Every structure is written in structure tokens, then in C-alpha cells.
Image (spheres, rainbow, N blue to C red):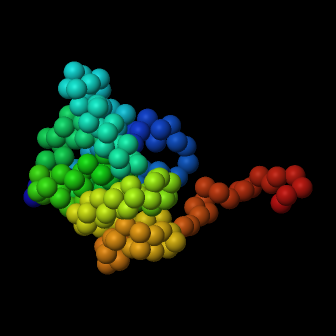
Amino acid sequence: MARLKVLFVFRQLGVFEAIEGPRDSWYGMGDFDNERVEVSHVARNEEGRGMIRWVWLPVEQLITKLSGAGFSLYVMMRKWSRFGQAKLIISTADAVGLPVLLAKRLGLLKAKVLYISQGLTDSVERITPTSRRRRVKKFYGWLLGAADKVVVLGYGAVSPLVDMIGVEESKIVVVPWGVDNEFWSAGKERLPGLC
């Protein structure tokens, strides 16, 4: 039986490799059954500096300026075969996740997309003037409509996505805030004066 191909999209992979402690920062990347699932990743900081990158950069900068968020289409162009082969794409970064949703919306990607939204609505609220903010909200709503599921961290993130961006509530999955009791426990050592 062929293994399911899952592709994770990160902003900066090197940051996660340096983290000690719980693996929460990897969004479950290391928790799949390797016999049934083939997991790979791409990261925005892997995009390189080829000639096509420099030709494409002004287009990305214009989209970024208009949309209020990074829009790294070049990462997708450079790693297109990996995106095209994936059956599930898990986006953890807007800068590459939004282009993934654009490609899916345009029918260029057939994979299911799980989009993890962290602060997108906060970024939209900072956009001025108001007329531009309205256009960006509509654009994001159109893009996020292509996601199979939108994951948010905490229940407080649901209503801004629904009310501000227009995401269908049935598409939103909430991961409640929690604490890793093993990592954040004092253990046998006590802090003088505190425990």
C-alpha cells in the first residue's frame, strides 16, 4: 500500500531545529506512523537566491504590500513537485500558506490543505486605510475558502475569522490552549522561596 504524502510548510525550519523541550513547535510533524505516512517539509527560508527569484521578487513585494502579509510564491515555484505530489499540505506560515491556498483556489493543487491561522486577523486589523483593509479581508476570505480546514489556537480566534474574514465556522478546528505538565514542572528541584 502506498504511503500518504504529507507536506508541512514552515516559515523558518532552522528555528524549530534549535528548540529544546516539547515538540509542539513541529505541529505534529514527527508524530506520524512512518509506515503509513511519508512526511516532508519546505520552509520559506529555503527559498534560495536564483535569477528567477530576483525577477519574481517585485511581484511578491507588491502582493505583500497590498495584502498585509508575506506572499512567497517563489517557494512554491521552486518546490512545485513536492507540492504537487502531496495529498495533504499542512501550512504553519501565512507567507507560504496563502500562496498554497491561491494555487488550490485556481485548481493547480489537488491536495487537501490544513491551514493553521496564527494572528492573520490581527495583521488585517493593522492595515490602513480602511478601504484597503476591506479589500484584504475579502481577498483572505476568498483564499481561506479554499482550505479544507482552518486550525486556530484558542476559542478566541474563531469569531474574528468568521466575522472579519468570512471563514465558514464549520471549517474551523480549535486547538485549546494547554500546558505540557511534564516540561513545565519543577520536578525534584525546588526553587528557593517559591516552592
The residue lying toward the viewer, choosing from 144 and 90, is 144
Q: What residue do we see at 80% from left, 54% from top?
A: 190
Q: Residue at x 89, y 55 (%)?
A: 193
Which of the 4 quarters of the picture holds residue 173? Answer: bottom left
Quarter of the image for the N terminus: give it: bottom left
Farthest residue, direction bottom: 170
Q: Nearer the viewer, residue 133 or 84?
A: 133
Residue sitting nearer the eye, 138 or 45: 138
Percent x, y of residue 82: 18, 43
Image x and y of residue 141, in percent: 31, 64
Extreme-top residue of the structure? 51
Among the 4 quarters of the image, the one containing residue 47:
top left
**x and y percent of residue 176 in the render?**
50, 70
The residue sitting at 41% across, 69% down in the picture is 164
Quadrant in which the C terminus appears: bottom right
Of residue 100 and residue 192, the one placed in the foreground of this image is 100
Q: Is residue 113 above or below residue 26?
A: below
Give the tally of numbered discs: 0
Residue at 50% x, 54% y: name it: 126
| Left or right, 59 with reference to 188 | left
The part of the image, by quadrant, that contains residue 51 is top left
